[in-house]
Each structure stands twice: as structure tokens, then as C-alpha cells.
Image (tube, rainbow, N blue to C red):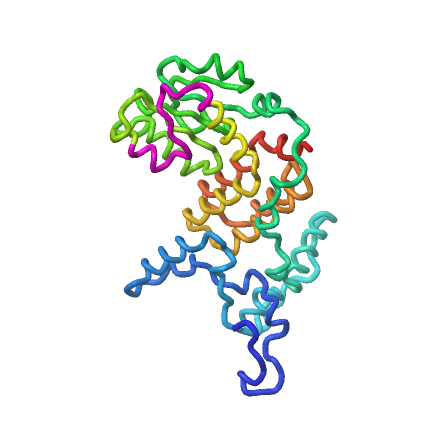
Amino acid sequence: MKGLSGAHLGGGVPRWPNQTRYAVGDYRSFTDLRPMTAPGAKAALSLCRRRAGHACTWLAPSPPNHEGMCSRHLGYSVAGQSPNLVPSCSEPLIRSWISNMLNKFFPKALNSYSSVLELRDYSKGPKTSLNKMQIRSSVKIAIIDDEKFKAHANLTNYGYQITELPDIRSLDDVMEYDVILCDLMGVGNNFDQSIGGASIIREIKDSYPTKYVIAYTGARANSAESKAAKEFADDFLKKDTEITQWVERLDLAIDFACNPYERWLLTRQGLIDEEVDLRRIVELESAYVEAIESKDSDFSSLKSTLEKVDLSGNSKGIIQSLIASGIYALVFAT
């Protein structure tokens, strides 16, 4: 549809003005396939979900429809249902109403949204002024183990800020931590006991995809718990691993957790898995990128966008977890 000329439509004048600058609302999302009941519909939806890692790649423009355009962009249909142009409200509400009307009359073109690709080289920019010990002490790390973690004291000497938890009752217990070490045996009693700590890891990664989780165990590597953990965890170590390797892996975990580009890739995939409309993901991604580039630690624009889009509780929780992290104090410290 992009680039369609008047010749294709049987006339000399293009039918669709500015046809190469579609607004996000003019694109289709893989979630539009939900109502399909024809054979193969579920397979098509699954294919879109798997390949939607780069959201814009799978956005296809909707067919031009003048009545639909009027309804979406102008606030009324060609049948003559006009909006109320004289709202009775306070000044802030008037400003909000004017802003909404401007968005309808002049929808934001897709290529005017910010992309996470703009953050890809973020880690190559100016480094934080904090030294390694300060960085380690700024990241909250949780260890979930029903026994005393033997490497705790040594890791504390390296500067890590570690809290030990014998088990967790709910995911709220790990909400404040960006890096989590989880034993596989003797924990997970409030989740799926058949796979122990692996069930905790699975739930954490489903609800908080940006949290970096390291699984460890003293059991054999081919146990049911170990096999399940390797499927969900970001890293896997043996319980008796040398302290130097623990330090190496924790530093890698912190580097990853502090990378805003990688954090959004995980967030975006989590939203796709929740079948969030790709058009909404584009809006959320743009607001996130703009917050990072402007060093807006409050994420005002993203919070505002989050209030406007229709997300399920779990999808909204993924975004809230992303921006609630204390990691950004390090991200913005240069």
C-alpha cells in the first residue's frame, strides 16, 4: 500500500495524501488476528508473535478508508456525527482536550517515533564516574536459598549488596531486586514444588523479564530442577563454583541490568508474549527511549503513555517493574 499512486487508483491525483507517512493507528497489529476462526489462524498469530522482535517490521498499513480516517483522525464520521467543540471544563482540562484534538487532526507519523535502536550504542558512550565497588554496592542482589549461602561473606567483601531470603511467598518479595540468585533445591514451596527453585525463576522471568536471574545448585546438572532452570534462567552455575567465577558472573549480570537497550528488548518481548498490540508497544518504546535520552529518572512521558494505553494487569506490571528499578541511578550517572 505504501507508495500507491494515482495511476494505480485509476486517476492522476494520489488518493491518499502523505501516503508514505502513516500514523501508528493506520497500521495493523498481530493482535488483529485474535478474532480469526479460519483454519491456520492460530498458526498465523503464533508466527507473528515469534517474528515480532522488531515491532515495526511486522506492522502492515491498513487499507485506506475515508470514513474510518474521519472517525480516527477527526473525531467524527462522514455521517455527520460531530464532536462537541465547546467543552465546559477547567483550564487544565481544556488544554488536555486541545492536545487530544490536535493528535486526532494531526496524528503522529510512525517515523517520528523514537526507536530502541537509538540506544543500541548507549553503553559505548560516556561511562559512569562511579568506580567498580560503588557500582556493585548500588545494585540490590537477592539470594533465595533455604541454607546459608557460603559465598555470601566473600562476595560482600567484593562490594556487592546482598540480601538472603530463605524462600519467597510471592513475587512481591523480589520486586526491589535487579539481580537474583536462586537455589533449585529446598525453595519454591509456594509455587511448583516438583521443580523447586526453577518454578520461582519461571515466574520471575514471566512477570519481570528485566530482572537478571542466576540459577545455581549442588544437585546434578541433569536433574528435573536443573533442566527446567536452564530453560528460564539467564545464567546457571554450580553451587561450589570458585569465588572468582561468581564475581565474574555477577559483574556481567550488573552490566546487563544497567544496559537500557537490553532492558527494553526483554520488556518488549515480554509485552509481545502477553499479546499486547504492537501499535501500543511502539508508543511505549518511543516514550522509554525519550526518557533515557533526556535522563528523565521519573519517566514522566512513559508513565503518561502507560495511563493512556489499554494494558492487562500483567503487561502493565512489566512496564512498572522496568521503570521502578534503582538501576537508572547508575544509568544516568556519567
Judge whether 29 appears above or below 199 on screen: below
Q: Estimate the x, y position of residue 200 in percent, counting from the top left.
A: 36, 29
Q: Estimate the x, y position of residue 227 in percent, counting from the top left.
A: 29, 34
Residue in view at x 51 percent, y 67 percent: 61
Boundaries of the magenta span:
227-246
Q: Estimate the x, y position of residue 334 in percent, counting from the top left.
A: 69, 33
Residue in view at x 56 percent, y 60 percent: 24
Seen from this angle, which residue lies furthest right? 91
Q: Estimate the x, y position of residue 239 in percent, counting from the top left.
A: 36, 21
State left or right for residue 253 relative to residue 241: right
Judge whether 167 appears above or below 128 on screen: above
The part of the image, by quadrant, that contains residue 101 is bottom right
Q: Per the image, is 332 magenta? A: no
- Name the one closer to the observer, 152 or 203: 152
Residue in view at x 61 percent, y 87 percent: 12
Total marks in image: 0
- Name the one closer to the observer, 159 or 111: 159
- Residue 79 can be seen in this image: no
The part of the image, by quadrant, that contains residue 51 is bottom left
Judge whether 89 appears above or below 194 on screen: below
Q: Per the image, is 241 magenta? A: yes
- Name the one closer to the observer, 331 or 297: 331
- Name the one closer to the observer, 287 or 181: 181
State left or right for residue 261 relative to residue 38: right
